[in-house]
Image (cartoon, rainbow, N blue to C red):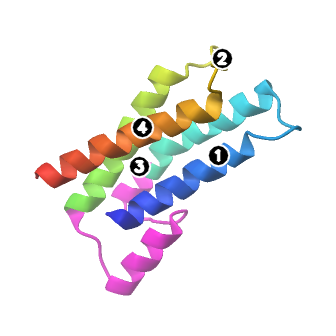
Amino acid sequence: MLIYISDIFLQRNQLSTSIQGRKIHIVKACEKLKSFKQKLPIWSRRIKAGIFTGFSVLEVTVKEFGCIFPRVQQEISAHFDMLQASFDGYFSAGKLSVSEQGIDHSISTLIKCQMVMFLKKISST
């Protein structure tokens, strides 16, 4: 499970760094956030289908061990669905605004909260 967590945080860090810097503006940041959000259901479907492309650590590990437990696969897919729903609550199309902490803080908080809920769910079963 930690393998997936490292991959999702890598994705989050790539998003975070892509929306920072002098040459980034709110329109570009919104486009990148929208693009990330649109990837979540795609990633969910791919994980359900056993396609781990884009999650390099998970992909290598599955190839090395030859399989992934179906329950873990379902939980990862469900986590993507949960992240998408959370994104809808944090950012809605056309209504993205910058808080005092900035966009990056909101994304970081969102993903951290989702990861805590996800880990609690996994550990309780």
Q: Earlier in the sequence, mark 3 or mark 2?
A: 3
**Along the horizontal axis of the image, is 88 left or right of 99?**
left
Residue closest to the eye, 56 or 113: 113
Residue where numbered disc 2 is placed: 97
**Mark number displayed over residue 15:** 1
Q: Which mark is residue 75?
A: none
Say which residue appears at 65% left-offset and 27% top-offset.
102
Residue 85 picture location, percent across and down: 40, 29
Residues tagged 1 and 2 counted as in contact (Cβ below 8 A): no
Asked whether, in this view, residue 99 is left or right of residue 78, the answer is right
Q: Earlier in the sequence, mark 4 or mark 1?
A: 1
Magenta span of residues: 44-70
Cα gap from disc 4 to disc 3, whole angstroms: 10 Å
Q: Quadrant of residue 78?
A: top left
Disc 1 marks a residue whose amino acid type is Leu
Q: Position of residue 59 (x, y in %)?
A: 45, 72
Q: Say which label, 4 or 3, has the lower sequence index.
A: 3
Up-down relation of residue 110 to residue 97 (above or below): below
